[in-house]
Amino acid sequence: MTVLSKFRALRDEHAAVSAAGRDPFGVSFDAVLSATEALLGGRRILLLGTNNYLGLTFDPDCIDAAVTATQERGTGTTGSRIANGTYDGHAALERRLAAFLKRRSAMVFTTGYQANLGALSTLAGKGDHLLLDGDSHASIYDGARLGHAQVTRFRHNDPDDLRRRLRILSSQPGEKLIVAEGIYSMLGDTAPLREMAEVKREAGAWLLVDEAHSLGVLGEKGRGLAEAEGVEDDVDFVVGTFSKSLGAIGGFLASDLDGFDALRLSARPYMFTASLPPSVAASVLRAIDVMEARPELRDALRRNGQKLHEGLVAAGFLLSAMPSPIVSLSMPSRETAVMFWNRLLAEGVYTNLALGPATPGGKPLLRMSVSAALTPAQIDTAVDAITRTGHALGLLSVPLAAE
C-alpha cells in the first residue's frame, strides 16, 4: 500500500477505457497543422473537439505579436505580479479587455480555471452564499470550496428554482452571489439569463456570468450571452478565458464595481501564481482586435454550428441543445461511447469523449466543438463519418444514403 493506492479503482477504470483502443485522455498528435487539422500516427486528422471557436491559434498577426513580445521581453515572468512586478503587456491587456467588455476594471489570471478560483473564493467567503447552477463547471465548484461560502445548487437553467432557493435564504445574513455560464461546455446550451437577472434584482443578489465558451461567440460584438440577451447592466462580474475564442491561455475577471483592485490583494490564485508570459499577453491583445474587427468569424462559426447540427439531425441523431458551436451526442452506455470515439478517430475525426461524473447526470457523451475555420466540406466529412459510425454501432434507424 502507498499513498497512491486510493487511486487504484481510477487506474483500473482508465485501463479498461484504454483497452478498447487508443487512450482517449492521452492522445498525442505528431503535429498540429492548422486550426482544423493535425497529424496522428502519420495520418491527417480533422479536429472537431478543440474549442478553437474563431480559429485564431494560427492567425498570422497573433503569432507575430507573440514572437515579437518574446524577443523583446523574454519567455516568461518567473513569478507573480505582486512579487515580480507587472509587465507593460499585462496592464495593456487589462485596459483593452475592460474597454472591450465595457467595464471599468479587469484583472488577468494565468488560466481560466484560476479566474474562477480567484473570483469565487474571494467574492464569497465564510458567511456568504453561492448559488450555483447544478451543471456548473468544475472550476466553479472548486472556487466555491476554496472560499468556504455556503453553496446552494439550483436546478440547471431553472430561474424558478433559483427564485425559490433565494427566498429560503432571504432571512440569512451574508451576500448572495448567483453564478451562471454563458454556454455550458458539455451540451452547448445557454443560460436563461434575462429571467435570472430578474430573479437577481428581486432578491437583491449579485450575478456572476462565466462567458468562457460564449466570449467571441454570442452577442453582436462578441461579448457573450449577457450582450446577446441585453442584460449586461445586470451582470456584476464577468469571468472568462483566453483559451477558447482568443486562441491562447489565461483568464480574466471584470466588473464595474468600486474597490475592484482590492481583489488583487486578496485573490490567492492571482497573488501566488506566476503571471502570463509576454508572448501570451501580446497574442491575446491582438486576438481581441481580430475578434472586434472581423465579425464575419462569428457568422462563419454560427453557420458551421448550424450545419453540423442539421446534418446530424438529418442522419437521425437526437440532439438536445439548440444549434451552437458545441454539439454533443448522448451515448447509451460508457462502452458504446468509448467504441464510438475510437471508431470515429479511425475514420479520421477527433472528438471529445466525455464521461461521468464530469457530464450532466453522469451520462456518457461524444462532444464536438466547431470552429469558424472549418470549411463546409470538412463538416460534411465529419457528418458522414459520424453517421457511418452511428450505423455501424446500431444507433441509427435512418438508412444510409446511397453513394
Image (cartoon, helix red, strand yellow):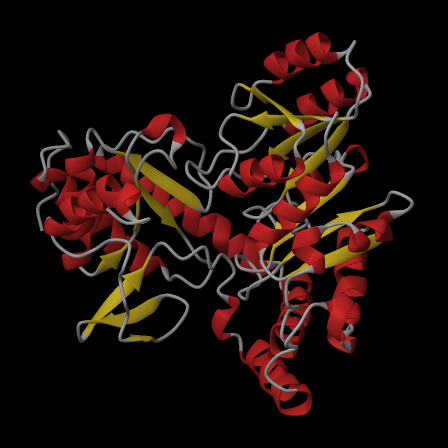
Image coordinates for residue 211, horizontal then vertical, percent: 62, 45
In the picture, measured across the screen, residue 26 lies left or right of residue 186, that is: left
Q: Residue at x 49, y 48 (%)?
A: 302
Which residue of the protein is positioned furthest toward the front in this rendering? 1
Q: Residue at x 68, y 23 (%)?
A: 196
Which residue of the protein is positioned furthest toward the right in this rendering? 258
Residue 106, quarter of the rendered image: bottom right
Compared to residue 255, the image places residue 276 above or below, namely below
Residue 109, quarter of the rendered image: bottom right
Image coordinates for residue 393, horizontal then vertical, percent: 10, 38
Compared to residue 219, the image places residue 197 above or below, namely above
Of residues 76 and 287, the one drawn nearer to the viewer in this rendering: 76
Compared to residue 186, the image places residue 95 above or below, namely below
Image coordinates for residue 66, horizontal then vertical, percent: 60, 80
Compared to residue 22, the image places residue 234 above or below, namely above
Of residues 109 and 83, the one drawn nearer to the viewer in this rendering: 83
For residue 345, say whether it is visible: yes
Image coordinates for residue 27, horizontal then vertical, percent: 26, 62
Q: How many marks?
A: 0
Of residues 221 and 28, the one drawn nearer to the viewer in this rendering: 28
For residue 221, say whether it is visible: no
Residue 275, quarter of the rendered image: bottom right
